[in-house]
């Protein structure tokens, strides 16, 4: 293994991050308003490194997880270093990092010791995002504008201060604002849980060690990168890319709401 990290410590750190993303998923499951999330579990959670590369993901929808790198690329392209503690980003535009419009991303940068160390990322399918039909899904739509409200990469919170304008625009353009805004708050809660869990790991291991572990994970999960060592791929062999968890599994594992 590269550096001075031993494989046992690395494995503990890696699985602790997976536990954090599972706790993020559980937070959405327990606090969401809509049946789409509580019953269908149509959402995903992840942690990314400070450059926006996915390093851990919750046991949720595998089809969503492949979209998080694209959303992160869009956030990094638009904001780069123009972000700070307390910022939270939102987007759903399929032409700028998103998928179809009902899938809304909420992304929060995580800072520790005045350094951007990671991101907490969530994506949820929302009950309605406006458009020509209820539910914002119609097989005979011919253009994106018929599907609903397009949200480019924006700051939902700026330095901890909520942008009420964005919330009001969303409220007035969806059919069930109580459900949509309730689910957005569930995503915010999950990002907060992700930040809290990762900061605790940073306190225990330190930022240099955490970044080294992030690099080791990326050596395994991004095979086009030159691996630092064979040991890191062995230690990271339990990566759960594409895993999924059902509502009944979460209920059995953690208990119902």
Image (spheres, rainbow, N blue to C red):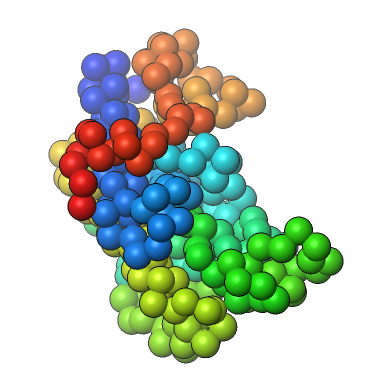
In the image, residue 170 above or below residue 139 = below
Residue 126 location in percent, x, y? 50, 63
Residue at horizontal 22%, vertical 34%?
Answer: 253
Is residue 59 visible to us here? no
Residue at horizontal 58%, vertical 63%?
Answer: 102
Left or right of residue 219: residue 25: left
Residue at horizontal 24%, vertical 17%?
Answer: 8
Quadrant (top left/top right/bottom left/bottom right) for the N terminus: top left
In the image, residue 201 above or below residue 143 = above
Q: Residue furthest right?
A: 142
Residue 58 location in percent, x, y? 38, 39
Residue 181 location in percent, x, y? 40, 74
Left or right of residue 93: residue 14: left
Q: How many marks?
A: 0
Q: Could you say which quadrant of the image residue 195 lies in?
A: bottom left
Residue 135 location in percent, x, y? 58, 67
The front one of 124 and 218 is 124
The front one of 208 and 235 is 235
Left or right of residue 72: residue 94: right
Residue at horizontal 61%, vertical 50%?
Answer: 70
Is residue 32 visible to us here? yes
The front one of 35 and 88 is 35
Q: Could you say which quadrant of the image residue 138 lies in?
A: bottom right
Left or right of residue 137: residue 71: left
The front one of 177 and 185 is 177
């Amino acid at each position: 293994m590269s550096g001075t990290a031993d494989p046992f410590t690395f494995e503990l750190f890696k699985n602790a991050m997976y536990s954090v993303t599972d706790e993020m998923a559980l937070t959405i499951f327990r606090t969401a308003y809509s049946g789409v999330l509580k019953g269908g579990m149509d959402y995903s959670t992840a942690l990314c490194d400070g450059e926006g590369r996915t390093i851990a993901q919750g046991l949720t929808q595998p089809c969503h997880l492949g979209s998080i790198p694209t959303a992160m690329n869009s956030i990094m392209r638009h904001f780069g270093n123009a972000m700070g503690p307390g910022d939270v980003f939102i987007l759903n535009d399929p032409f700028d990092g998103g998928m179809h419009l009902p899938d809304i991303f909420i992304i929060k940068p995580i800072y520790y010791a005045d350094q951007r160390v990671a991101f907490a990322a969530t994506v949820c399918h929302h009950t309605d995002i406006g458009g020509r039909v209820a539910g914002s899904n119609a097989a005979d739509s011919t253009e994106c504008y018929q599907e609903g409200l397009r949200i480019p990469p924006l700051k939902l919170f700026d330095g901890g201060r909520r942008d009420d304008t964005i919330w009001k625009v969303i409220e007035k353009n969806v059919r069930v604002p109580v459900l949509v805004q309730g689910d957005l708050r569930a995503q915010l809660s999950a990002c907060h849980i992700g930040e809290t869990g990762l900061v605790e790991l940073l306190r225990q291991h330190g930022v240099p060690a955490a970044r080294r572990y992030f690099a080791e994970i990326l050596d395994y999960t991004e095979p086009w990168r030159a691996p630092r060592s064979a040991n890191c791929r062995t230690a990271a062999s339990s990566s759960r890319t594409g895993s999924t968890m059902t509502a009944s599994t979460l209920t059995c594992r953690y208990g119902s709401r």
